[in-house]
């Protein structure tokens, strides 16, 4: 709806400007300038404000969706890592989530950068991402206070 109102205000400003250009009004008179500002500039500024607000909101919404998508992937990766004893490969992500190998590597590397995963390589050259916190979840019931000896 704001998009329609924004375009309507811009159209109104355009028609008012056209009417001003076709009128006999004295261009330098203060009353003419004031009338021009009120009838042309204000609707034009209002229309531009509504349209840019609408487009910025769309960009923010898109950004929020992407953030949510990233967080969802990461939580599902950690859940899968818990099921697989804290070790995953990119191929496992590709098959489990139906994503591209590039996206799988990007997700795993982002977890590695945030120090949630480390990289190990098998003798055959397979890159394995190890999630130490997930791998050691079984020790959780035996946790002690930091100052306890």
Image (cartoon, grey):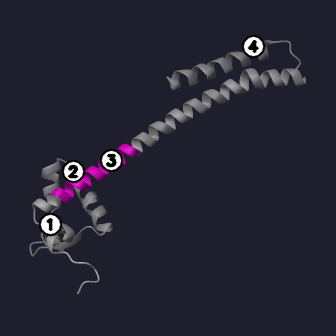
Q: Where is residue 108 shown, x and y percent of the image?
A: 25, 61
Mark-to-mark CA distance, 1 and 3: 23 Å
The image quarter in which residue 40 lies: top right
Q: Where is residue 133 shown, x and y percent of the image?
A: 21, 69
Q: Which residues are magenta?
A: 64-79
Point 24% across, 68% down: residue? 117
Mark-to-mark CA distance, 2 and 1: 22 Å
Point 68% across, 15% down: residue? 15
Q: Where is residue 122 shown, x and y percent of the image?
A: 11, 73
Mark-to-mark CA distance, 2 and 3: 19 Å
The residue where tag 4 is placed is: 19
Relative to residue 148, is residue 46 depicted above or below?
Answer: above
Q: Which of the two labelled residues, at mark 3 and mark 4, occupies the earlier sequence position?
A: 4
Point 13% across, 51% down: residue? 96
User: Is 70 colored magenta in this rendering?
Assistant: yes
Left or right, 51 with reference to 72? right
Mark-to-mark CA distance, 3 and 4: 50 Å
For label 3, the crowd category at 10 Å Cα-Cα, with few meaning under 14, some 14 to 19 and many 20 or more, is: few
Q: Tell me the tag on residue 100.
A: 2
Dot 3 lies on which element? helix
Q: Which of the two labelled residues, at mark 2 and mark 1, occupies the earlier sequence position?
A: 1
Mark-to-mark CA distance, 4 and 2: 58 Å
Dot 2 lies on which element? loop
Left or right, 24 with reference to 138? right
Q: Which of the two labelled residues, at mark 1 and mark 3, occupies the earlier sequence position?
A: 3
Q: Tell me the tag on residue 86.
A: 1
């Amino acid at each position: 709806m704001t998009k329609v109102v924004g375009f309507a205000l811009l159209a109104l400003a355009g028609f008012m400007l056209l009417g001003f250009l076709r009128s006999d009004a004295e261009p330098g008179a203060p009353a003419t300038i004031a009338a021009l500002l009120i009838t042309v500039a204000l609707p034009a500024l209002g229309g531009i404000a509504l349209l840019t607000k609408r487009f910025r909101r769309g960009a923010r919404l898109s950004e929020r969706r992407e953030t949510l998508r990233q967080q969802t992937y990461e939580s599902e990766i950690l859940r899968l890592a818990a099921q697989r004893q804290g070790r995953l490969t990119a191929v496992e992500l590709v098959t489990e989530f139906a994503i591209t190998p590039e996206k799988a590597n990007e997700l795993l590397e982002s977890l590695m950068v945030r120090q949630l995963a480390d990289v190990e390589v098998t003798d055959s050259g397979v890159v394995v991402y190890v999630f130490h916190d997930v791998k050691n979840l079984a020790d959780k019931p035996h946790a002690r206070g930091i100052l306890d000896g």
